[in-house]
Structure formats: structure tokens, C-alpha cells
Image (spheres, rainbow, N blue to C red):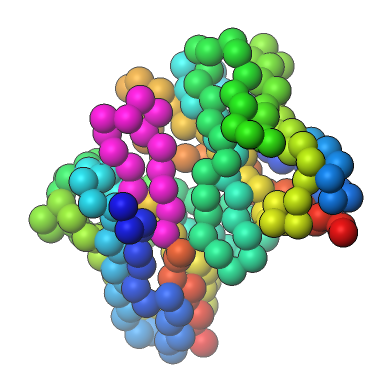
Amino acid sequence: DTGVSQDPRHKITKRGQNVTFRCDPISEHNRLYWYRQTLGQGPEFLTYFQNEAQLEKSRLLSDRFSAERPKGSFSTLEIQRTEQGDSAMYLCASSRLAESTDTQYFGPGTRLTVL
Amino acid sequence: AQTVTQSQPEMSVQEAETVTLSCTYDTSESDYYLFWYKQPPSRQMILVIRQEAYKQQNATENRFSVNFQKAAKSFSLKISDSQLGDAAMYFCAYRSAWGGSEKLVFGKGTKLTVNP
């Protein structure tokens, strides 16, 4: 397995702009998760997919956030009309349903800075 | 809703010594999983150890072991023979088992410093 990859690793944008992040899970992992981590905090759950279906969304995922996983492989997370409060590390994780504990494996994250 | 509390924002240990990181959680569920993740500076989060709540035996992975006290809702991590590479943020996490949410609920983390 090559591990979970995320792109870009860093993104600087101006307030009001739209940004999109990509996550490629470990091959054959059918579950994919997005988390947000702010400085000094643990990651907070945003949403998760099983194959292409988005099965759970956090109340943190406002209307400006949208996530997709169109073919059950990679996923994108889009933030529209970014705000300074969106500055954070966005983490992606994947897991395989067949594993008894369904352990989540994390990517390196995308660090977003909104100016 | 489940919560995870790590009461030690920072800990330090001398190289080759043993350190214990604390974690408590709150849940009304009887079946769940607990995890310790390590996040080195500017590097990705990796799994250290996991524990199934239905198992009474404490999990062990090489120098890492846990003390799982289900009644007390406590899940501490012991690192033996600490190495410089153990320096990182350590996060305790909870996940529901059957029929519950698939999300991980994390504590705020403990920053571990290893002194040579």
C-alpha cells in the first residue's frame, strides 16, 4: 500500500475564494473520512463515505463545505467563500470495512491558510 | 455524545525511561474501540495501538502498552524504554462499534518531549 495521499499539502487563499482539496485513499479501502484539525486541538470529524455514498456529516460541515467521492475512489472537499475561521489542517483517512476494528489510516493533510 | 479527555497537555521523559499518558472518556455505549495515535511534528498521524472494549486483556505493541479500565472509562498509554523518535503529539480516540457512528472522537492531545 502506498498510503493515503492528499493534494495540495499547503494552500494559501484570500477570504471569499473557493478552494478544493483532493484525497486518494489506500487502494481497496472502501471508507474515506475527512477531519479538520485546528492548532492545539485534536482532529474533528467532518464527513465520511462508504464507497461513493456519503453516510455521515458533522454539523461542522456548513453549507459552504461540500465533499464528493464520485467513483468510490478519490474524494474532493470544496470550501466555498472561505473565511478566516476555515484556516486549519484538513486530514483525510481511509479504512477497509472488512477489518474487525476498521482502523483509519491518515494522510499527511492539507494546511489551509485564509488571509 | 461521546467525549475524550486528555488531562496532560504536555509530558516529558528521559530517554530509556517509562512514561504514561492519561486518557478518560465518556460514553453510554457498551461496545466500542479505543485508539492511541501519534502525530510527529509536521508529519502524518499514525496508529500506535488499539483496544477493543469487549477484550479484558490490555493491548501491547512492542514498547507500547495500554491500561484499559472499562468501569473507570480510562485508557492510558505506557511507553517503555522511551526513544527520541517517540517525541510527538499523542491523541487518544474513541469509536463506536456496531451500529454507532463511524467517526473517531479525539482528545486534545498530549505533547511528549523525550530528553536525551
> Which secondary structure class fits the magenta region best?
loop
What's the residue at 49%, 82% (across, down)? A114
The mark tally for this picture is 0
Who is closer to the viewer here, B113 or B27? Answer: B113
Residue A72: x percent and y percent?
A: 15, 51
| Res A89 visible | yes
Residue B104: x percent and y percent?
A: 47, 40
What's the residue at 41%, 37% (across, down)? A103
Who is closer to the viewer here, B45 or A87? Answer: B45
Q: Residue A25 occupies which quadrant of the picture?
A: bottom left
> Is residue B80 positioned above or below A44 on the image?
above
Region of the chain picked out in magenta, as a range: A94-107
User: Is B48 left or right of B75, judged from the image as shown?
Assistant: left
What's the residue at 40%, 23% (across, down)? B97
| Res B8 visible | no
Residue B18: x percent and y percent?
A: 83, 38
Q: Is residue A3 one of those drawn in magenta?
A: no
> Is residue A76 positioned above or below A17 on the image?
above
User: Is A55 left or right of A107, judged from the image as shown?
Assistant: left
Q: What residue occupies the far left of the structure in this picture?
A: A71
User: Is A1 left or right of A105, judged from the image as shown?
Assistant: left
What's the residue at 71%, 30% (across, down)? B76
Residue A102: x percent and y percent?
A: 36, 33
Who is closer to the viewer here, B79 or A85? Answer: B79
